Amino acid sequence: MEILNNKKVISRLKNAKRMVVLTGAGISAESGIPTFRGENGLWTKLSPNELASFEAFYNNTAVVTEWYKHRREIIEDSKPNPGHCALVELSKIPEVFNLITQNIDGLHQKAGCEDVIELHGNIMECYCIKCGKRYTSEKFDEIYNNTLKHIPKCDCGGLIRPDVVWFGEPLSRENIERAYQVSINADVFLSIGTSAQVAPASDLPRYAKRNGALLIEVNPNRTVLTDIVDLWLKGDAGDILPKFVEEYKNVKEN
Ligand code: BJW
Ligand code: ZN
């Protein structure tokens, strides 16, 4: 059974020149990385506000540091799945392709995507909150292992934190501006594996649609976007995306 079976959708895909993809935690679920919300979400057990904020890090440094170290170890052991790989193939088809991710796991890059707009940072990088000195994960681990209470500190005495964006923190201006720009110009916008609940990333699909893009969602579950999308491809990204890419190639060629 074909997943692209709607004439209007096919004709808009055929004429599309600019495609934008926004990914969330769901695309990495099949690589063994837990999502944040939902049934198997990280935060069904732990409250997001208790962990992913600067206040949490400052007041409970050991707990938050341990949480990130644990997640980094899962990510280091993980591999891109067929969903990530299909996006590399997809990137070669339209004239203009942009990939925006909320994920901090670097799996799109591991799969071979060269230009990824990372909205929420990358878990492999760290920096000192006082002097800004940057630390690799290897250096971080070295300091972590040599610190009695597992609270890594910089030479200057400042705490070392992961280079991710927590609640209440601004996103990199350059990245979010670029993300808005490409989304507004998109002919097709794919929202993949995100609950679309966290702003400003969650605004991007809506802006794209308002500016004329065909909006497609890939998700096994309904989200706050599902009612406004032009096409909901219900299922796991690792299953849907390889099929989507094959059928999209045919649409473009015929
Ligand atoms: C599958 C699948 C499969 C499963 N295939 N799919 C009220 C109070 C306080 C704050 C706010 C407020 N109202 C608005 C805000 C702002 C806030 C916000 O949006 N909060 C909402 C929760 C209400 N946003 C911010 O604070 C942002 N900053 C900001 O606004 O700054 C303003 C500012 C300006 C100037 C100066 C100062 C400030 C920052 C947001 C940062 C988000 N950070 C996190 C943590 C990153 C680090 C880390 O990983 O620990 O980013 S939160 C977390 O959520 C993470 C994710 O990137 C993000 C989005 O989650 P995502 O990817 O959508 O995952 P899930 O789990 O929600 O969904 C997974 C989906 O996959 C589900 O739909 C599944 O069905 C699906 N799925 N398996 C495909 N196989
Ligand atoms: Zn420092």
Image (tube, grey):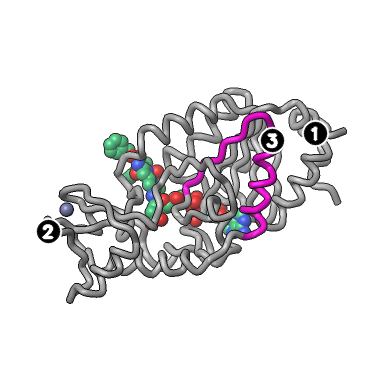
Question: Within 8 Å: ligand 2 and the Cβ of disc 2?
Answer: yes
Q: Which mark is residue 230?
A: 3
Going by the numbered disc 2, the residue's amino acid type is Gly
Q: Residue at x 19, y 58 (%)?
A: 159
Q: Give the mark, 2 or 3, whose residue is nearer the N terminus.
A: 2
Q: Going by the picture, which residue comes out furthest to the bottom?
A: 148
Q: CA distance from mark 2 to mark 3?
A: 52 Å
Q: In the image, which disc is placed on residue 252?
A: 1
Viewer can see residue 128: yes
Nearest to viewer (mark 1 / mark 3): 1
> Which residue occupies the foreground of this view, 80 or 188?
80
The residue lying at 38 percent from left, 70 percent from top is 70
- As measured in the structure, the alpha-carbon distance from the residue carrying label 1 to the one carrying label 3 is 19 Å
**Furthest residue in direction left, as rendered:** 157
Q: Please rate how many residues cluster around mark 3, counting C-alpha atoms within 10 Å: few if below 14, some from 14 to 19, many from 20.
A: some
Q: What residue appears at the point 50 percent right and 69 percent down from the top-left corner?
A: 77
Q: Which type of secondary structure does the marked residue at label 2 adopt?
A: loop
Helix, strand or loop at disc 1? Answer: helix
Task: Give x and y (percent) for residue 139.
Answer: 29, 64
> Which label number is shown at residue 157?
2
Residue at the image position 33 percent from the left and 58 percent from the top: 136
Q: Which residue type does callout 3 highlight?
A: Asp
